[in-house]
Image (cartoon, grey):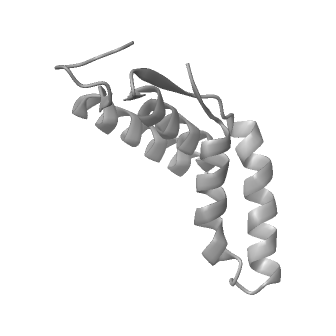
Amino acid sequence: METRNGRTSFFDGGLLQYIGWTILGFLVTICTIGICYPWALCMVYGWKINHTVIEGKRLKFQGSAVGLFGNWIKWLLLTIITIGIYGFWVFIKLEDWKVKNTIFK
């Protein structure tokens, strides 16, 4: 069981790491004109989730950019078909996908 300062739930990522992953994700998204945005999301989600410990158990992110990309295309098409209405649900669908791809190590 992992502990930090006597606590069993904590986050052990650092600020410089966060800034680095965020900048890298931004640059990848810009350089690919948004096509690799799902990859950038997976990168940042992975960093956040993999540095989280709950009740002494570390979380592990198993999502892939390929898996997210398929959903991303589907969500984009549904948003276009519904004239933007489905866009309100994309955030919820993205959170659901993130949780489905997170396990305890």
Observer-nearest of 50 and 43? 50
Above or below, 96 relative to 7: below
**Vertical placement of 21 versus 71: above or below?**
above
The percent position of residue 69, horizontal first and vertical second, equals 74, 47
Q: Is residue 41 left or right of residue 69?
A: left
For residue 35, say whether it is visible. no
**Percent from the top left, x then y, of residue 40?**
54, 42
Q: Is residue 48 left or right of residue 28?
A: left
Where residue 28 appears, x then y in whole percent? 53, 41
Tell me: 8 left or right of 93.
left
All told, the count of numbered labels is: 0
Residue 57 in which image quadrant: top left
- Name the residue at 59% across, 49% down: 37
Q: Quadrant of the N terminus?
A: top left
Percent position of residue 35, x then y: 67, 50
In depth, the one of 8 and 14 nearer the eye is: 8
User: Which residue is the extreme one toward the left?
Assistant: 5
Please identify the quarter of the rendering in which residue 16 is found: top left
Q: Quarter of the image for the C terminus: give it.
A: top right
Of residue 97 and residue 76, the one placed in the foreground of this image is: 97
Instruction: Identify which residue is drawn at 29% across, 25% down.
Output: 12
- Residue at 61% x, 45% y is 98
State whether residue 78 appears in this view: yes
Tell me if residue 97 comes above or below residue 39 in the rendering: below
Seen at 51% across and 51% down, the residue is 30
